[in-house]
Amino acid sequence: MKIFAALSLLFVLLAVSATSRSITIYEGGNPGQFDFYLFVQQWIYSYCGQQTCIASKEREAFTIHGLWPENSDGSYPSFCKGPSFSSSAIQDLMNQLNYDWPSLTGPNTDFWTHEWSKHGTCSLTGPITNIHDYFAAGLKVYNAYNISSSLADHGIVPSNTQSYSITSITNALINSLGNTPLLQCQNGQLSTVALCITKDLELMDCPALDGWSCSGSTIIPSTD
Ligand SMILES: *[C@@H]1O[C@H](CO)[C@@H](O)[C@H](O)[C@H]1NC(C)=O
């Protein structure tokens, strides 16, 4: 009888530990379970007005922050089950990533490791099958939909004195790219633009999302 009780207890303990192991595995959500991507770019001079940047990285440009799985209700999966970041997987993209997807405040590899762990692991769906696909997708979308040139085509150029209405910026992007973007402003400056991308990596209209709105007019700060 004692042996039976001891075995029962052992069985219960094994069952509990097996359960907690399986919870841990799925804790971060499953890859591919989201509605669309937010492709987020910051305007360097606005971003670097809010924090100390590495001076050599500052230039007049939008650079990539990330390609983020997102749901229409504003929730999103993060830190999904998947391989750990590996620089060797993206060796051939390194020159482009250093220029177009840099950390403005620290080592680029630390930034990419974070973006991959938090967002990339959840993006393993459709055409994105591995680490290389994920970073290549970001670069592809960045090159395909040029925000700076879309704005410049409508006379909207960086300036520390000329402000632009949010409506004119939004309309310029809709007119050039074909779809509605999302904007964020900070201290009267345009800080962030997000494009919405389908799981097949096509541009789509962004739904309204909490935290994404600017009103009135804004500055796109320049070097001088
Ligand atoms: C986007 O357009 C700007 C302004 O025309 C240009 O300087 C920049 O190189 C372009 N970026 C990409 C990724 O093509």
Image: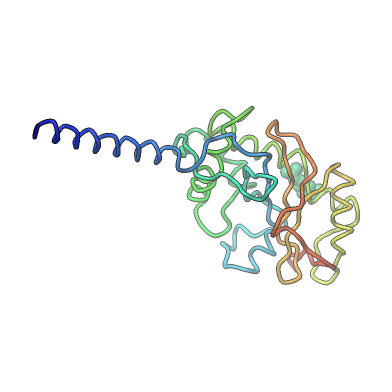
Residue 165 percent across, percent down from the top left: 87, 64
Between residue 21 and residue 196, name the one nearer to us: 21
The quadrant in which residue 10 appears is top left
At x 56%, y 28%, the residue is 129
The answer to whether 117 appears left or right of 191 in the picture is left
How many numbered marks does the figure carry?
0
Indicate the quadrant containing the N terminus: top left, top right, bottom left or bottom right. top left
Between residue 137 and residue 69, name the one nearer to us: 69
At x 85%, y 57%, the residue is 169
Residue 173 percent across, percent down from the top left: 84, 49
The answer to whether 16 appears left or right of 75 in the picture is left
- Determine whether 92 is above or below 37 in the image: above
Residue 176 percent across, percent down from the top left: 87, 45
At x 47%, y 39%, the residue is 85
Q: Residue furthest left?
A: 2
Indicate the quadrant containing the C terminus: top left, top right, bottom left or bottom right. bottom right
Query: How are the colours assigned in the image?
Result: rainbow
The quadrant in which residue 178 appears is top right
- Determine whether 161 is above or below 61 in the image: below
- Determine whether 31 is above or below 185 in the image: above
Q: Residue furthest front?
A: 1
